Amino acid sequence: MEALPRETIVDVLEDRLREDILNGRHPTGSYLPPERQLADGYGVTRTTLKHAFGRLVQAGLLETRHGVGTRVRDYARLGGADLLPMLVRHDARWVREVFEVRRGVGTLIAEQAASRATPAQHDELRALLEAVRQAEGTDAVQLADVEVHRALARATGNRVYVLLTNTLFNAYLPVRAALSGPFTDPAAAHARLAPVVEAVIAGDARRAHTAADAYLEATERIMLEDLA
């Protein structure tokens, strides 16, 4: 068994500050109150506050200028896709937008993989697809399914597709328990994904695009029903 992580006061403060920023309590472009005042308001030490600030600066929500103060960054204009996991946890409505991009990118990846995949990558895809069927438990099926998509992205030979795939999965894997519907039955999950892999191995780009679109539409519909 894996030990559960222990939440520290810095973790709690980071979550609280993040929610206050995303909820508009600290508006975009505004400077946060002085550190001493903010620390007193949250009931923490300034050291704890600095640690939480550091995490939120790294996440792209804050920017600190020495001698000036700490300002809420315009993450909607300046932020990158690395913010998506945080935004999805904050507001489930982001999931629909992630799925829209997932579908557009996923069909292109399947199409490109069909044109570019090597025989060795075909073998890898066969093995990973079979791992979906053999997986035990919903979480294991879902993670096995993810690995097939990572392999499809690698098969395009385009590293940007690989990074985009990682970004999209990073956005919703932290909340995957709420999106487990398509993966409760290993055989059904395998059957949905198999036409994509078969088309890629056959080198049929048009069929791969169509199969990927059908797979992504079906799994998206089931996952959104779960959320509803």
Image: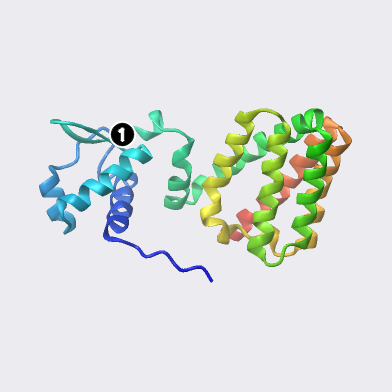
Between residues 197 and 219, which one lies in front from this camera angle? 197
Q: Residue furthest front?
A: 120
Structure colour scheme = rainbow
Q: Secondary structure at mark 1?
A: loop
Residue at mark 1: 73
Looking at the image, residue 156 sits to the left or right of residue 161; the answer is right
Mark 1 surroundings within 10 Å by alpha-carbon count, few (fewer than 14), some (14 through 19), many (20 or more): many
Visible in this render: residue 23? Answer: yes
In the rendered image, residue 80, in percent from the top left (x then y), is placed at 45, 33
Q: Quadrant of the C terminus?
A: bottom right
Residue at 37 percent across and 65 percent down: it is 6
In the rendered image, residue 85, in percent from the top left (x then y), is placed at 47, 46
Amino acid type at circle 1 is Arg
The answer to whether 219 is drawn above or below residue 81 in the figure is below
Q: Quadrant of the N terminus?
A: bottom right
Q: Residue furthest right?
A: 202
In the rendered image, residue 100, in percent from the top left (x then y), is placed at 61, 39
Residue at 27 percent across and 60 percent down: it is 9
Quarter assignment of residue 11: bottom left
The answer to whether 163 is drawn above or below residue 15 in the figure is above
Between residues 41 and 143, which one lies in front from this camera angle? 143
Residue at 66 percent across and 39 percent down: it is 103
In the rendered image, residue 48, in percent from the top left (x then y), is placed at 21, 53
Residue at 67 percent across and 42 percent down: it is 150
Visible in this render: residue 228? Answer: no
Q: Residue furthest bottom?
A: 1
Looking at the image, residue 122 sits to the left or right of residue 227; the answer is right
Looking at the image, residue 212 sits to the left or right of residue 60; the answer is right
